[in-house]
Image (tube, helix red, strand yellow):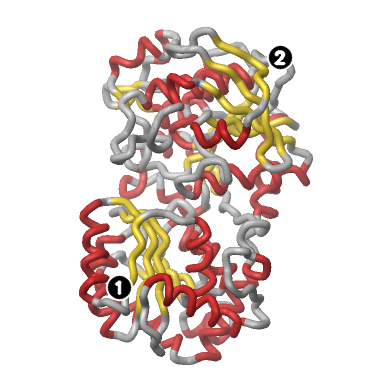
Amino acid sequence: MKVLSVASEAYPLVKTGGLADVVGALPAALAPHGVHTTTFIPGYPPTLKAVGGRAIHKWRDLFGGEARLLRGQLGEHPLVVLDAPHLFVREGGPYGDASGADWPDNWRRFAAFARAAAEIARGGVKGLSFDILHAHDWQAALAPTYLRYADTRVRTVMTVHNIAFQGRFDAAIFPELGLPAAAWAIDGVEYYGGVGFLKAGLEAADVITTVSPTYAREILEPEFGMGLEGLMRAREDKIRGIVNGIDPAVWTPARDGALPASYTSRNLARRATNKHAVERMFGLQAGDGPIFTVVSRLTWQKGMDVLAECLDELVAMGGRLALLGSGDGALERAFLDAAERHSGAIGVRIGYDEPLSHLLQGGADAILIPSRFEPCGLTQLYGLAYGCVPIVARTGGLADTIIDANTAALGAGVATGIQFDPVDRASLLFAIRRAIDLYAQPETWQSLQRQGMKARFSWEASGAAYAALYRELSSL
């Protein structure tokens, strides 16, 4: 079976978040199940530099300029890159300029990308043919829509990694999309008087997946559906929740080159070397209390405003914090101000650094994830693998993957972290206090670490679930 996986990013070529990790890991996860996956991504400058590749197809005019398809490799698996300089070769990030503002022509950039994906999937490029097109998030969501109005037997899967990001644009762009007039409808691309990319993909896809079973249920409700809950309820029988995995080739403390000291669950004492490295890099003074870490976008969704309110108390309780992230300017300032108030107890790095994120998982004692909603989450899975105890809000994939250290779970030896609810100051502070109290009991804390490290959230089970879904679709 041949699958075209369509996404705006894929690790290690381009990454802004967990989407890239998922897309990068899928081909290897699916291969043991007889699924041959080709990944299709845009040709951003770093991607073109890394991939090279040979041209296998050309367009004289793809949404306003010449474009080519380049063939390359994503690890050991096939990759196709859309080289369209007028759309993707520019200074800044994949979705916005250096200041963080969205590119005003994002609708054009990702409509072209989706149009090209649909053409590839239905056999419009010599030498390429596919049984399934698997689109990820709004940037790829028009691909199922283009196929819906084409003469093709290609089946489509639409994965929602975060329903809050929808790709909504003004109605004036509709004539530029190259879709038939019939697509301007409530069951097409029209969305509250404008064009909704994600909404269109959700309408068109044969099957919808989310990245955890709990999130699949949550998005049926107004609190989490972000305006699409009605559509989700109407298509509830087409929605599946499949938890993301993590790639053990990348995230394994026993052989992680980013760590000063490698370790396993049998020699956790070696983590002390990594902890000292975290202290040095973040200017933290040595202490008896735990080091909490945050590796996150600094946004409202991630509950970072609530955490910022708790920092004085966290330090007063004897905790320390090492934070790596970027996002909302006011939240960045709040954490930097806290680091000034509590020099030696709070260290902040604004930005993202992949090796440093590994060090934090391998050296900090616990990772704080107070998200208001979290479709799946990967940082808690990395925490489990690295013995960095997750402290998580009881929502989405966080609820699905962490077993709370309540009395019964501790007694049975199955606890892997701490859950709390609701996401407010009192609840988060109580969770932090629970963590500090458990940390003061070394045997209990090490039991939490070891139990978490036993958890199996590799792509093995997730890959099998996606392969089964593809087979089901191909038999229709």
Q: Label 2, on which residue?
A: 126
Residue 75 percent across, percent down from the top left: 69, 43
Judged by depth in the image, the label closer to the viewer, 1 or 2, is 2
Res 404 visible: no
Residue at x 45%, y 86% (from the top left corner): 439
Mark 2 lies on a secondary structure that is loop
Res 284 visible: yes
Are the residues flagged by discs 1 and 2 in contact, CB closer than 8 Å? no
Mark 1 lies on a secondary structure that is helix
Q: Name which residue type carries label 1.
A: Ser
Q: Eyeballing the image, is 195 above or below 243?
A: above
Residue at x 55%, y 19% (from the top left corner): 116
Q: Residues within 10 Å of mark 1 (few under 14, many from 20)?
A: some
Residue 314 percent across, percent down from the top left: 29, 78
Residue 237 percent across, percent down from the top left: 53, 38
Residue 332 falls left or right of residue 467: left
Q: Eyeballing the image, is 402 above or below 434?
A: above
Indicate which disc, 1 or 2, sits on the residue closer to the N terminus.
2
Closest to the observer, 303 or 404: 303
Residue 35 falls left or right of residue 459: right
Closest to the observer, 363 or 448: 363
Disc number for residue 288:
none
Q: Residues within 10 Å of mark 2 (few under 14, many from 20)?
A: few
Residue 33 percent across, percent down from the top left: 77, 44
Q: Label 1, on which residue?
A: 427
Q: Name which residue type carries label 2.
A: Lys
Closest to the observer, 150 or 27: 27
Q: Eyeballing the image, is 269 above or below 77?
A: below
Q: Quadrant of the C terminus?
A: top right
Residue at mark 1 to residue at mark 2: CA–CA distance: 58 Å
